[in-house]
Amino acid sequence: MAPPAQLRLWTGAWAGVVSAAAFAGIHHIFISNIWDMMGVMTVAGALSGLCLAWTYRRLDARKTVGGWLRYNLAFIGLFAVVPALSIAVFEPVMTFAEAAAAEGPLDELIVEALPLTVAVVVVMAAAVSTTFGSLRRDFGPILLTVVVLMIFLGLNLTIIGLVGWSSTMPRVIVGFVGLILALGLVFALAYLWFERKQLEAAWS
């Protein structure tokens, strides 16, 4: 039996940068041009990718292609549920036009959604820790990872229910979920490409 793959951390950061660029491209094509935010998105992608690679590497489970994909799909699936949860919990307090006209982050909505955000972060960390490792040993590092992902990627998801989208609601939810799926899959596959030599035994 081959020894477990010794996955590297810096490639997680690079995969995060690749996924950030892909996100900006998809956003440009389907929504709006956000290339001027690429500097911030590069930092966000690198830190998020680093955290995901770090937590996966420290798990007891044998490092395989399938294991890495399942690990990332767990995060993708959990974040994809957040918009629907926000809609179920909150009533709109701001119209879409008001939200679109706002400059910068919607701080008031983020603060109002904070209890839900905290609950979602804790539940996500517990679910991932229990599924892929040990709640006692892995909860702390995975909680840190979820916090980083939530700060950079998830805050807009938790406030969706506080914005009135009228008849566009289904399209908005599909759009957000699609962006999450694209971002997560690009990151996961980019990391596999960077780590293909370390994982080549797992392909057979």
Image: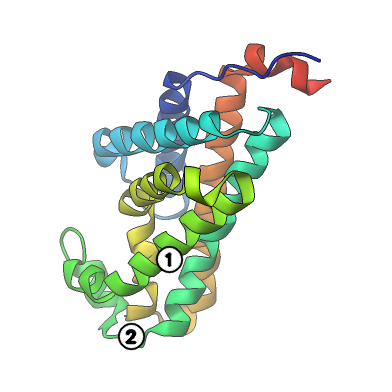
State the image quarter where residue 7 is shown.
top right
How far across and how far down the image is residue 90, in percent? 37, 84
Left or right position of 155 against 73? left
State the image quarter where residue 174 is shown.
bottom right
Left or right position of 11 against 119? right
Closer-to-camera residue (170/8): 8
- In space, the residues marked 1 and 2 are separated at their CA atoms by 19 Å
State the SS at label 1: helix
Task: Identify the mark at residue 120; answer none if there is no mark.
Answer: 1
At 55% from the left and 58% from the top, the residue drawn is 127
Q: Is residue 85 above or below residue 196?
A: below
State the SS at label 2: loop
Residue 172 visible in the picture: no
Left or right position of 131 against 80? right
Q: Nearer the viewer, mark 1 or mark 2?
A: 1
Category of crowding for the residue at label 1, using alpha-carbon neighbours closer than 10 angstroms: few (below 14), some (14–19), many (at least 20): many
Closer-to-camera residue (32/78): 78
Name the residue type under label 1: Val
Q: Residue furthest right?
A: 204
How far across and how far down the image is residue 118, in percent? 34, 65
Residue 102 visible in the picture: yes
State the image quarter where residue 72 is shown.
top right
* Residue denoted by label 2: 92
Q: Which quarter of the figure is the N terminus placed in?
A: top right
Which mark is first along the chain, 2 or 1? 2
